[in-house]
Structure formats: structure tokens, C-alpha cells
Image (cartoon, rainbow, N blue to C red):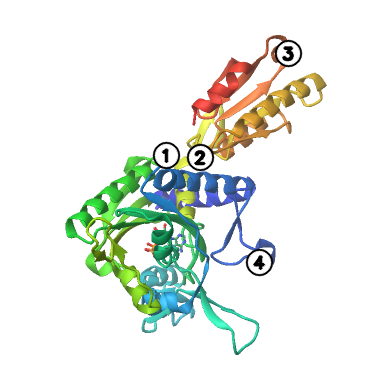
Amino acid sequence: MTHQKTHEDTLSKIVSLCKRRGFVFQGSEIYGGLAGVYDYGPLGVELRHNIKEYFWKSFIADRDDVYGMSAAILMPARVWEASGHTELFTDPVVECEICHEKIREDQSDEHAFKHKSESGSAGYKFTKAKKFNLLVGARLGSSEKTATDVYLRGEITQGVHVNFKNIVDSMHPKLPFGIGQIGKAFRNEIAPREFLFRQREFEQMELQYYVFPEKKEGEKWFEYWKNFSFEWYTALGIKKENLRLREHAKDERAHYAKNAWDIEYNTPFAGWKEAFGIHHRGDWDLQRHGEYSGADLVYTDSETGNKITPWDIECSGGVDRAVLFVLLEAYTEDTLGGETRVFLKLKPELAPIRAAVFPLLRNKPELVAKAREVYTMLKKESANWRTGGVMWDDNGNIGKRYRRQDEIGTPHCITIDFETLENDSVTVRDRDTGKQGRVKISELTKILKNIC
Ligand code: ATP
């Protein structure tokens, strides 16, 4: 029980750090907050960007067989009828007859337990489960007569499949090839909870990889992308023992899946939870969109002239879940110089700020001027880095500035002091060990570049 409490604490500590340090805020907070919706602040948006950038580079930009794209969020209802979401994208919902709260059926035991521990009553009852569709709808058009029903996409996947023909006609790819994208998805989750874990508006990063529709090809590429995705997730700086691959049971698979595995993260608040899915979608999507739209979505093999409908191997990850898991993994408390401190042990490539520059004293113009010089030089240099920026800080004493940078995960703090004025060397402090060393200003860009 004590154990459980500590774990729950980690999540609440992260929620409060995120607010205090400008990572993530409750959506529309000053109006009482909107459940399941979050806004990213200045540092959170950088961390999220760095994760997305890493995905884009690994799954799309570095490869010759994958194209990137960005489809619209609004799509007509017909798309979702074709994809099966109108009919099948549902969760079973029950109503508690004691407090009338609507909950997902799989959470009813937990709910009953809550009542039991509050009132001691073992008696509880739920209504029969009803299907609840998770798609978020909207209407477009200025008059009632001409307005059409659209949905905010429930998954970003469909935006790729409906563009399959456009990509084939414009880029002339050869099978196997992939199309990747990153973007927002919306789900009317019955019980949004656990901070960024289950939201109603969230971001996904995905690859749809089209292969020849043959059993062996499908299996080969499924294995390939399963392992690739797992390696990718580990490289976010997550310990191997906190990640696992788990195969879906047959009755657990989504309506389109021939085979499905999840990468799961061992969360401190609820054990193993899905982080990333690898799905063998077969020809489900292209067949259905061909049928419902009337468009010809077959692929002509340039060598044999055969017309085929490729199979799709999908890699699908939640961006916000990755942000949360990276934060959970990085959150560290230790004792340094006799004081307890909190720091984010982020991989330098993911840290929102790669280095902070401080003048030792803010009321000594010669120190401030020299520190500005170093800051401007590094800021210019940071244009060549794929991720992470440079921050100026002259607020409070040096100890306080270190604590602040530790809490946002900045790997290096650079202090300009009186010795700098004499020999152009600065103090560089390492976040994880708290150790400090003197480095020549001319060496700084090399040191910071090398960490990425
Ligand atoms: P879950 O079983 O947790 O509801 P899912 O199986 O419905 O997830 P997918 O449809 O496979 O999820 O979506 C792919 C990825 O999108 C998931 O692995 C997850 O990282 C992310 N994701 C899904 N739903 C949410 C949500 N409500 N909030 C944040 N991320 C989500």
C-alpha cells in the first residue's frame, strides 16, 4: 500500500512540476478546466517537438522508402463509415446506480471498490452495458439545409489511406513503401484520466507501410517494424525493464487487425499500459475506401503489370503518452551537497533547453556583457542543432538557478565569473552529477554539439 502511494505520488509530482515549470497546463484552466484536454507551455512544447522530430527523422526523413504527409483533421462522415469507426469504434459504458456516474465497463470493479472503501457498503449495481461511440462530430456549412456532418478524426491513419492514390500518382513509389504523419486525433473518451495518458484531444505519430499482399511479406515486415519501433522507444531514454512487447489476444484486436502487438510501459500509477501499437491491417482500409468512395485504389506492379491491393503494416504511437512516459522515467530525486533536489534526467537530445548561460552576478556590467557574448554565440550555434535551445538566466543566486534548470532537465549550466574575464574560461556544470569544471569558451560549441 505504501508502495502504491509512492507511485501515485510520482504522477502528481510530475503534474505539479509540469504546471510550475511551464510544461503542461489543464486546458482552459481559468474557466474551470476542460476534462481530458491539456495545453502545452513553453518547455512542454519543446519536449514534445523533440520527440516528434525524433520520430520524423527515424521513421520518415532518414529513409528512402517512406514519404511524409499531413492530412486534414476534418473528414466527412462517409470516411468513418468506410473505415468501420461509425459502427465499431465504441467502448462499453455502464452507469453506477449509486452515484449515476457513467464509466467504462472495464473500470466498474475499481468504481465499486471506491464506493466500498468510502461507505463500507459492499452493495453496488451497474446498468447493462451500452455501446458508446468515441468519434467527435461537428457540422460544417452555413445553412441547416446544406450543412454536412463531419468528424474530427478519431485516428490519423485514415488521412493516409484516403491519400494512397494521390501519393502513388504523384510520387510513383515502388512497393514496399510507407507514408508517415504526425497530427492531432480526437476521441470522446468516457473517462479521460491520468494526465496525458488518456485525453480527448491528443497527438499521434504514425507510419502506414504498404507491402505485397503475401503472407510471408506481411510477416517479414510486421517483425521488422515491431523490432524497429521497440528499439526506437527504448532510445527515448527508457530503461529496457520498463518496456515490453505484448501480443494482443484475438478478442482484443481492433476490427481491422490481422495481428497486433503493443509496446507497453510499466507506469507507476497503473502498471503496464499501451504506449505504441504495431498492427497488421491487411487490405482492410484500402478495400473499404475503394468500395465506399468508388475510387480505384489498386496498385499496379510496374514489373509484372499485376493489379493488387497492398497490405498495410501500421506503427502507431501517442505523442503525449511518450511525453508522459519520458517524464516519468526522467523524474529523479536525490541529495546533492546535503540538499534534496528534483531533476529531470532527460536525454540531452530531448531536453527543451540544452544549455543555460548565467552571469555570476547580475549587478556587474562586465560579467553581464561577457555572458551576453557567450549566450549570443551559443544561440547562433543552436540554429544548427535539430533540437534544444539556449536559455539566459540571471534571476536569483546561482544555487536557485541550478535548481530551476535541474527541474526542467537542462544538461549543462554555463557560468561566466571573474576568472572568465581573465582567461576566457567558464564553469560548466553537469546536471546529473552536479560536478563542475572549467572549459574554454572556444570549446563550448564543440562540447554542446557532441551531446547530440
Ligand atoms: P487504449 O487501449 O489505451 O485506449 P488504443 O488501443 O485505443 O489505446 P490506438 O487506437 O491503437 O489506441 O492508438 C494508437 C496510439 O495512440 C496508442 O498507442 C496511444 O499511444 C495513443 N492514444 C490512443 N488513445 C489515446 C488517448 N485517449 N490519449 C492519449 N493517447 C492516446
Query: At numbered mark 4, what does the secondary structure look like: helix, strand or loop?
Result: loop
Residue 350, label in figure: 2
Residue at 60% from the left image edge and 67% from the top image edge: 34
Write down the residue under mark 1.
Answer: 237
Give above or below for 37 relative to 292: above
What is the CA distance from the residue labelled 2 to the residue labelled 3? 33 Å
Left or right for 216, reference 31: left
Label 1, secondary structure: give it.
loop
Mark 3 C-beta to ligand 1 under 8 Å: no
Q: Are marks 1 and 2 in contact (CB under 8 Å)?
A: yes
The reply to whether the residue tagged 1 has its Cβ within 8 angstroms of ligand 1 is: no
Q: Label 3: which residue?
A: 421
Disc 4 or disc 1, which is closer to the eye? Answer: 1
Mark 1 or mark 4, which is nearer the start of the sequence?
4
In the foreground, 59 or 291: 291
Residue kind at label 2, given as amino acid type: Leu
Q: Which amino acid does label 4 sit on?
A: Gly
Please, what secondary structure does the residue beneath circle 2 have? loop
Task: Tell how many labels.
Answer: 4
- In the drawing, what numbered circle is on residue 32? 4
Q: How far apart are marks 1 and 3 (CA)?
A: 38 Å
Q: Distance between the residues labelled 4 and 3?
A: 51 Å
Cα separation between marks 4 and 2: 32 Å
Label 4 or label 2, whichever comes before in sequence order: 4
Give the class, few, some or many, for how many residues have Cα within 10 Å of label 4's Cα (few <14, many ≥20). Answer: few
> Crowding at label 1, few (<14), some or many (≥20) Cα neighbours within 10 Å?
some
